[in-house]
Image (cartoon, rainbow, N blue to C red):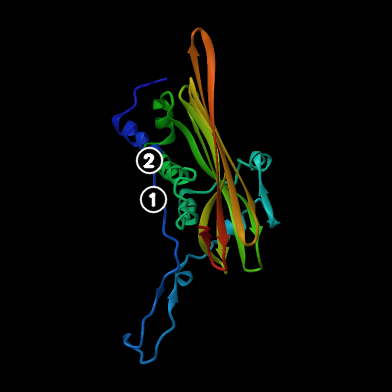
Amino acid sequence: MNMKTPLIVSCLLIGLVSCGEATDNEKTTINLGSDSPGTNDTQKPIELNDTLPEMPAEISERVNGTVNFPYLLNEDAINKLDLSDNVLSQEEVELLSQYMVIKPGFSDIDSRLNSYFRFNQLIDSIGEEAYNNQIDLGMTQYFDAYLHYRVNLTKKKYLLIWSLDYGTYEACPYYAGQYVLATMCADGKISSTVFIGEDSGGGDPPYMSSVFAGSDVWDTYIEVKLFEEHTEDSEMSGEEMEHTETIKSKCRFLITDKDIKLDK
């Protein structure tokens, strides 16, 4: 295998873990007033929902299955998510993720989304065969997106469950993970998207880490619980020592008639 990586590939891959910025998902109202051209009457305010994109039938009707709330996303449920044929394109991921609601410091889903787009744009530019011929230790090997389920909340709104699947070339350092998201569709329009689950891990010995996040999805809220475990192996006075740090955190989202909001 040719281990010489062109400068342009290296530079782009270095940025695969850079952080993105959350998109503001607050509802805005524009009052046109009676001075608007072409009318003498006061027009009704235009709400954000009026400008939201339609949910394509190609996506909504392509799910692997439909369930009703409550939807429990635990470790077993994540392991059973099908990663086979129901692939989301870059354009579809961009459409579903344009209104992200993110709690600062809770997960790195914004960074992962940015990495997904950068990696796949790189593959598009140089070709998969050329990339594989130049792949080196620790570099991203795959980064795909998959569509899974529809979770019905009411007659007019539901959640689409989809995920990102990522892994590096099998060497140290290595990393792999699956990140689960939920996109709300209200009255046929694509609204908010939130992070609801993760099963990932990796590292470069003696440093290792693992992350798991699961959630309970109801018709009025989503509660996400995240568990991080960071381990360091060391040797002191001839004895092997293992130091493990565990971090627990949680996040709660509120589901309204038209979108999802962070519960502050």
Q: Residue at x 48, y 12 (%)?
A: 236
Q: Residue furthest top?
A: 238
Which of the labelled discs sits on residue 148, or is there none? none
Indicate whether 250 appears above or below 123.
below
Q: Between residue 65 and residue 191, name the one nearer to us.
A: 191
Indicate whether 13 appears above or below 215.
above
Indicate whether 235 appears above or below 224.
above
Q: Residue at x 34, y 33 (%)?
A: 9
Tell me how far mark 2 sits from mark 1, CA to CA.
10 Å
Q: Secondary structure at mark 2?
A: loop
Residue bearing mark 1 = 21
Residue 228 placement: quadrant: top right
Q: Secondary structure at mark 1?
A: loop
Q: Are marks 2 and 1 in contact (CB under 8 Å)?
A: no
Three-letter code for the amino acid on which mark 1 is drawn: Glu
Q: Between residue 97 and residue 107, name the one nearer to us.
A: 107
Q: Position of residue 178 (x, y in %)?
A: 55, 39
Three-letter code for the amino acid on which mark 2 is drawn: Ser
Residue bearing mark 2 = 18
Q: Position of residue 258 (x, y in %)?
A: 54, 67
